[in-house]
Amino acid sequence: MIKVYGVSLSPFVRKVLFSLNYKGIEHEEVPVMPGDASEEFRAMSPLGKIPALQHDDFAISDSSIICDYLDRVFPDKPIYPAEAKDRARACWLEEFGDSKLAECCGGGLFFQRVVRPKFFNEEPDDALIQDTVENQLPPLLHYLESVIPEEGYLVGDHLSVADMGIVTHFINAMYADYQVDPEAYPKLGNYLNRAMSSDLVQNQLEIERAQMPG
């Protein structure tokens, strides 16, 4: 049995859930907040980060490592391309999402506009939000616009970890009332529209709406 420890509003947990759902792997979600200090969770995630995954008697943390593990143990419907250059590109885009894009969409937008007011009853940092939208995000969006194909997926001819690793962060930006300008970034805008309307994403969003505070 596979258990995923975390909360799906985390883009990193969501990426793992996308992988499991895409592959059709049965799993159980165990709600755990980042920094949980329980002995059970720290045994799986020594740094206290989510997600962590337990598969029978094996446990590991970090979303990228978990996704790679799942792809090797459950090779049907692979999310990492077989060809070396395509795999490298997919891994790079996954890392691009999990690093600077996560910093902007997560820390600069989602945390400020959603987490602080709705979970901590705090005022958002408007200066940080403005800097994120006006200065930090545009270079990232320009880069994505330059590498996204006119149609289809980010890498190869089927869904990959590259798509999951990019889209998951734009979902958090969407929760923070941020939308990519389709006139400034037409390829990125079209890509995100296609991704957001997919069954994989829509099914996940339906679950997450029940977790969002009013």
Image: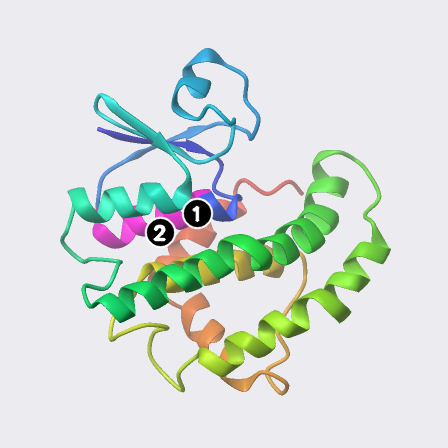
Q: Can residue 189 be seen by looking at this rendering? A: no
Q: Are marks 1 and 2 in contact (CB under 8 Å)?
A: yes
Q: Residue 47: x and y, percent?
A: 51, 27
Residue stretch rendered in magenta on the structure: 13-24
Q: Amino acid at mark 2?
A: Phe
Q: State left or right for residue 184 relative to residue 15.
A: right
Would residue 22 be counted in the magenta stretch? yes
The residue carrying mark 2 is 18
| Outermost residue toward the left in this view | 76
Which label number is shown at residue 37?
none
| Residue 25 sits in quarter | top left
Which residue is at the front of the view, 177 or 6? 6
Instruction: Look at the magenta stretch and give its main secondary structure.
Output: helix
Helix, strand or loop under label 2: helix
Q: Residue 132: x and y, percent?
A: 73, 62
Q: State left or right for residue 137 relative to residue 2.
A: right
The residue carrying mark 1 is 14
Helix, strand or loop under label 1: helix
By what rule are the colours in the image chosen? rainbow
Q: Residue 6: x and y, percent?
A: 46, 33
Q: State left or right for residue 137 relative to residue 28.
A: right
Which residue is at the front of the view, 181 or 130? 130
| Outermost residue toward the top in this view | 39
Residue occupying the point 61% across, 73% down: 180
Residue occupying the point 69% across, 55% down: 109
Please determine whether, in this image, residue 12 is positioned above or below residue 197. above
